[in-house]
Image (cartoon, rainbow, N blue to C red):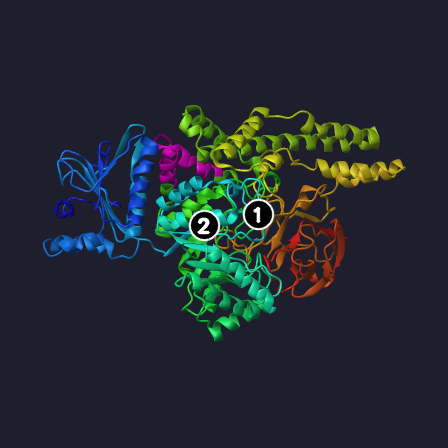
Amino acid sequence: MIRIFLLLSIALIVLADHVVSVESNSDHPDFEIDLAGAVVVCPSDLSSEEHKAIEMLVDEAQKRTLIRWDVIHQWPDDSVPAIVIAPADKLTELQSSFSAFFAEIAKPLTKGAEGYRILTTTNARTAPTAFIIGHDSRGILFGCGRLLRELHMRRGAITIPNALDIHSAPAYPIRGHQLGYRPKTNTYDAWTVTMWEQYIRDLAVFGVNAVELIPPRSDDDEDSPHYPLPPMEMMIEMSKLLDAYGLDVWIWFPALDEDYTDARTVESSLKEWGEVLSQLPRVDAIFVPGGDPGNTRPNVLMPFLERQTENLHRYHPHAQMWMSPQGFTQEWMDEFLEIMQHQQPAWLHGIVFGPQNRISLPDLRAAIPKQYPIRRYPDITHNLKCQYPVPDWDVAYALTEERESINPRPIGEANIFRIWMDEANGFITYSEGCNDDVNKIVWSVLGWDPQTDVVSILRQYARYFIGERYEEAFAQGLLALERNWEGPLLTNQQVYTTLQQFQEMEKTAGPGELLNWRFQQGLYRAYYDGYLRRRLIYETELEESAMDLLRKADEMGSLLAMNRTEEILDRAVTHRIATDWRSRVFELAEALYQSARMQLSVPRYKAISVGRGANLDLIDRSVNDRDWLLGRFAEIRKLTNEKERLDGLETIVNWTNPGAGGFYDDLGNLACQPHLIRGPGAIMDPEFRESSQVGFHYNQGYRMSWIRFAESRYDTPLKMEYKNLDSHAGYRIRVVYAGEIYYHGLIRMRLVADDGVEIHPYIQKEDPARPMEFDIPAETTQDGHLTLRWYQDTGRGSAGRGCQVSEVWLIKR
């Protein structure tokens, strides 16, 4: 044992004069050392967590290369390459003999917990040597993970750059993801213990130190047809796994009962939570959301959580209690802040900032006493109706790929991470499956080092998970998939380029890549996006042809015009296009179910609902106004008078015409919202607290312009501005309030012009939506300028959605 560390210390003294920083250029940047024949050298008296880390390193290298390193506890022959792994505290016994070395090596390791140093050299011994020195047990784990990310691995070969010197420690103490074994997820409920261990390893390799579990009872079904184990058994197994790797175990534990002022309810809840906590080998923290789910006002919730903290400490004495003010109305938020500022509960460790929070993270941080750390709970899994929606998403995507699709957003997620990174001490993300896998890795690496270049993260992701030969192509493919979602799909020719790039990778892929679920996810999205764009172009052309026919209705007769129009529109169903791309999407959906248990369809793979990732079921949903037109035709055919029928068709043809001197805005259409005031935008305001955003809400038979809309959140008004109006004319407004009719209460809208001139008071949204007209008072347009502001009821909680406007006509009278 002493011989190992004596030689290790001598080697490190030599290394001190020869290694360079990983950020610097090596004297031999293209020179790599060969570790295929290496052995792993480590002390025999490592902790179980450290042994687990080394086991992970050896296993994961073998999976990618078919090479298995031997693990030994004595120094090998000088001609044998070695990977030397040791925690820093195993070297202190030699400090007196090598004080100069210890002074040098301690510098990077004193940065903080979980840090490590990785060095590679050919100068310490005859054979190449790599060193992993961990600050502590987690430093060993994350050092092994970083080494795996730096290795170049392929079948029968393992190399690594020479003269590598990485000194690293995490910027944030909490870096994790919620992995909920429950039916609502699009993947997790079908995973076995073996699959869970693999995914936990994958996350640990990229620096994750915490996983949040979900108890058997949540806002979910009690059972899933996919469960390989009952929920409590799987929760125990996951807690064991995380403990084995030395990772923190958090529990997202919602307070679901109706009335915590009732003593019997409290006692029942204490018993229920205790039964869960008593069976788990490790619990480090509990996070109780204030809402989504849950609906208990703060002055009742906080005493209840104090009782549950006592309950928690019976089984896990050092575990922490955290909570979030999610879903609170303004009244409840004021009550919560009063408690935090004046009572400052000692039992509460910290506050979580998540979705459905009325105030921003900076405002929350300013309002909460400094002794309470804040942890972020960002939603990285959803695309719409969520905390961080895809900015300006095309309605065709919203209708088909929906809320929970495969969604790599590396640039967007990095911006969301960095914009408020100084306001919290870390994060555990909100995830509903492996659809957001890329986003998890981006957050994980940035949680370690916020300045890491996003493209370098993607290159490591591709090299480690897909393979060295796809490092650049797959990394760029992920960036291309994010660009597929930017701007109007109809004009985004990038989508076809993205598909071609993935098809090239597909053609050269071997069995390993084709069976790799991460590779399959990229292909699925590329083919789905490509098929959708081709179909959108086709259905748009069909609708244009149909409208051309309707414009001739007075010549053809109304009934014949409608019949011919329907024949054209129905070609979208009877004469499909790009069927080879469509078929490949279905094949990849099956492959993803087999490889990762992704449930991309309700009837085929027993997904819990279409909105929970089952977008295969939406692949043929209409992306033009066919459904609305057929519905209008059915109503017009009921008319017995030809003139009335022609008038009905004329209304359709001239739907967007505001008349001479008027203006029309389709507020959910980026190409047709010239009078909308957008605000700061997604880069500065990714939650859209001060900005308008494009939102979506599907109703069967609605126009596309009613399915999409502009919306604002909470008390922020939605604003439009008109300039250079005719100051001598009168105006009338026609408006459609589509979107959600009821969201945690009935939604009412109020319209105000300029500095408070009320156009209409609060009125309830109608179902179904319809155009409504209101006079604009003459005094508001006499200066040729008009500002319109829409409000929903103030002080609302939940996600703050509801102020949603679809179409606006300003009609000159």
Rendering coords of residue 465 (x, y %): 39, 36
Residue 807 marker: none
Rendering coords of residue 789 (x, y %): 65, 59
Return the residue at label 1. Answer: 384
Q: Nearer the viewer, residue 394 or 289?
A: 289
Say whether residue 266 is magenta.
Answer: no
Q: Write down the region rendered in magenta.
A: 458-481
Q: Is residue 546 left or right of residue 714?
A: right
Q: Is residue 567 above or below residue 207?
A: above
Rendering coords of residue 485 (x, y %): 53, 40
Three-letter code, disc 2: Ile
Three-letter code, disc 1: Leu
The quarter of the picture where residue 576 lies is top right
Q: Is residue 493 above or below residue 74?
A: above
Say whether residue 460 is magenta.
Answer: yes
Q: Is residue 353 visible?
A: no
Chief SS of the magenta region? helix
Q: Is residue 302 above or below residue 24?
A: below
Rendering coords of residue 753 (x, y %): 68, 61
